Amino acid sequence: MRSLLGVVLVLAACGDDAPVDPHELRTCDQTWINNGYDRCEAACVASATALTAMGPACEASTSIGTLNCSKTFVFSGVTGCCATSPGQVLFGECE
């Protein structure tokens, strides 16, 4: 029984380090919700991260087309920025 508990704890610990798909749809944080956006791609859930980005500009791709990121941030090893679309916030990956 102890060895099973140990395996479960090890698997749980490893699960926290798994990369998150930046485009996975999730519920936005309260700031986005207050501004009319309820669905966010995972990289953009935290409005503070998106709105205070300070990285270099780039051309980026989203699920609905390209955009120019004036400031970027890194999420799960991917550089990009957030852009709003009706009801949702999308993550644009720098090319």
Image: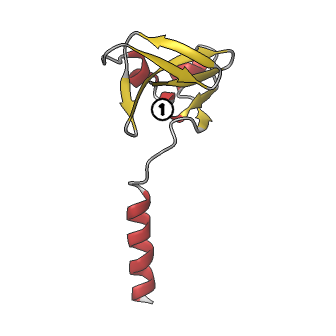
Number of numbered labels in the structure image: 1
Q: Where does residue 27 sit, x and y in percent of width and height?
A: 60, 33
Q: Where does residue 68 sit, x and y in percent of width and height?
A: 47, 11
Q: Can you tell which quarter of the image residue 85 is in? A: top right
Residue sitting farthest toward the bottom: 1
Residue tagged 1: 43
In the image, is residue 16 above or below residue 75? below
Secondary structure category for the residue under label 1: helix
Identify the residue at horizontal 62%, vertical 18% (top origin).
65
Disc 1 residue type (three-letter)? Ala
Q: Which colour scheme appears in the figure?
A: secondary structure
In the image, is residue 53 above or below residue 17? above
Identify the residue at horizontal 41%, vertical 55% (top origin).
16
Q: Where does residue 94 sit, x and y in percent of width and height?
A: 43, 23
Between residues 84 and 1, which one lies in front from this camera angle? Answer: 84
In the image, is residue 5 above or below residue 94? below
Q: With 16 as the anchor, is 25 left or right in this view?
A: right
Q: Where does residue 78 sit, x and y in percent of width and height?
A: 40, 34
Residue sitting farthest toward the front: 95
Identify the image quadrant of the N terminus. Answer: bottom left
Identify the image quadrant of the C terminus. Answer: top left
Label 1 Cα crowd, 10 Å radius (few <14 / some 14-19 / many 20+): many
Identify the residue at horizontal 60%, vertical 36% (top origin).
26
